Image (cartoon, helix red, strand yellow):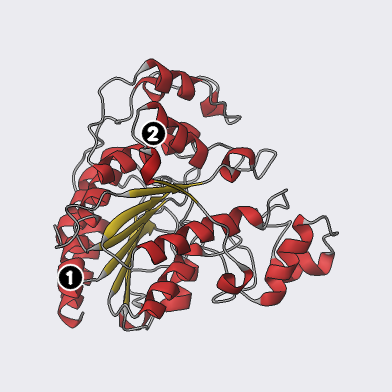
Amino acid sequence: MPRGRAAVKPLFIGHDIFRRSTYGGRHPLAIPRVSACIDLCRALGWIDPDRYIVSPQATHEQLLRFHDADYLDALQSVEAGAALTPEMKARYNIGINGNPVFAEIFSRPATACGATLHAVEALREPGVIYSPAGGTHHGRPAQASGFCYLNDPVLGILAFLDQGVERLLYIDIDAHHCDAVQDALAGDPRVRILSVHEDGRWPRTGALRDDGGGTVFNVPVPAGFHDDDMALLLDELILPVAESFRPQVVILQGGADALAEDPLARLDLSNNAHWSVVRAVTGMADRVLVTGGGGYNPWSVARCWAGAWATIDGRDIPDRLPAEAEDLLRNITWQRSAGRNPPGHWFTTLRDAPRNGPITPAVREAVTVLRPRLASI
């Protein structure tokens, strides 16, 4: 473990806006995620009040570090009730392409950004901070994209660089490639980006040999990518990149849509694999920020992200959930077909059964292609 952190207890950042806000209708984000994670952690007695921070909302000035003023004005005006014109739809990609207009179209993403920026300020000192609302890695400077209206990872990275950080490692295990993060920061010698994502999945970027000018490690993995595949990547690529780069700060985007039960991807991880990456990341630097990201099955996301906090905070994960936690999970509803008859372990446990198998050839190829680049870090 890096020096200076042993006596510092991790912090959890959340906000009730994620409880009352929804993208609406049958949108993939019409489900509880952040609130379900927080409630589950509380039901398990895992959130100490003195280590739970209510997220501030990012200010207009803070958001301008990456986003265009006219775009921010448009989001705020639509939230205030202004009509969304066809020109605004086309220009800002809101109200179309999976980026709906909803009541908190500005304040919800601005609160996620506020959480990340608050974490950056708190991490001037050694520590680990968990913000499951963060990880909106598709947001563009002047457009919504991929359900993301603002981009808290980019804002967080820029804020760390503004503090004088010289070596920052951004790791992304969401099923979808972190296209907007790469586009914003590839080529900056102070930043390394490592993304493990499903090959061919939207936004269809992040090819294996796309190195972002030498600062990006893209690992596109095939459908069926499982726990043993992730273990190989962790041991033979992710940890060696960290050891070679010696980051002062690590950010992990912990999207849960690479889990087997997710409806928007075809990967086959159990949450054990997710937690193994979380555990490894917390030992890579004195300053670590872990965020959420994608994830569209409410039970698998809540269980995964609650277990991520347990991993960060050194909590034991029980074999059987207590009654309060089980009741909470049983009271979640999901309109997709898988939500009509969910398996019993989604209610009674956090830990999935491991998903093992022979190493996928494409995963071995990725390690073979990318390992030689370690010498140039």
Is residue 121 shown left or right of residue 335?
left
Amino acid type assigned to the residue bearing label 2 in the image: Cys
Is 350 placed above or below 62 here?
Answer: above
Q: Which residue is mark 2?
A: 41
Spot occupied by residue 121 in the image (x, y as percentages of width and height)? 40, 66
Which x, y percent locates residue 376? 19, 82
Disc ID at residue 371? 1
Q: Is residue 147 visible?
A: no
> Is label 2 in a helix, a strand or a loop?
helix
Query: Regarding mark 1 in the picture, which secondary structure is present there?
Result: helix
Q: Residue at x 26, y 30 (%)?
A: 317
Residue lying at 33% horizontally and 34% vertically, measured from the top left? 46
Quadrant housing the N terminus: bottom left
Quarter of the rendering containing residue 346:
top left
Residue 29 in picture, x, y percent from top left: 58, 43
Mark 2 or 1 closer to N-term? Answer: 2
* Camera-side residue of 53 and 365: 53
As drawn, 55 above or below 155 = above
Q: Is residue 43 above or below residue 373?
A: above
Residue 125 figure quarter: bottom left
Q: Is residue 155 visible?
A: yes
Residue type (three-letter) at the residue carrying disc 1: Arg
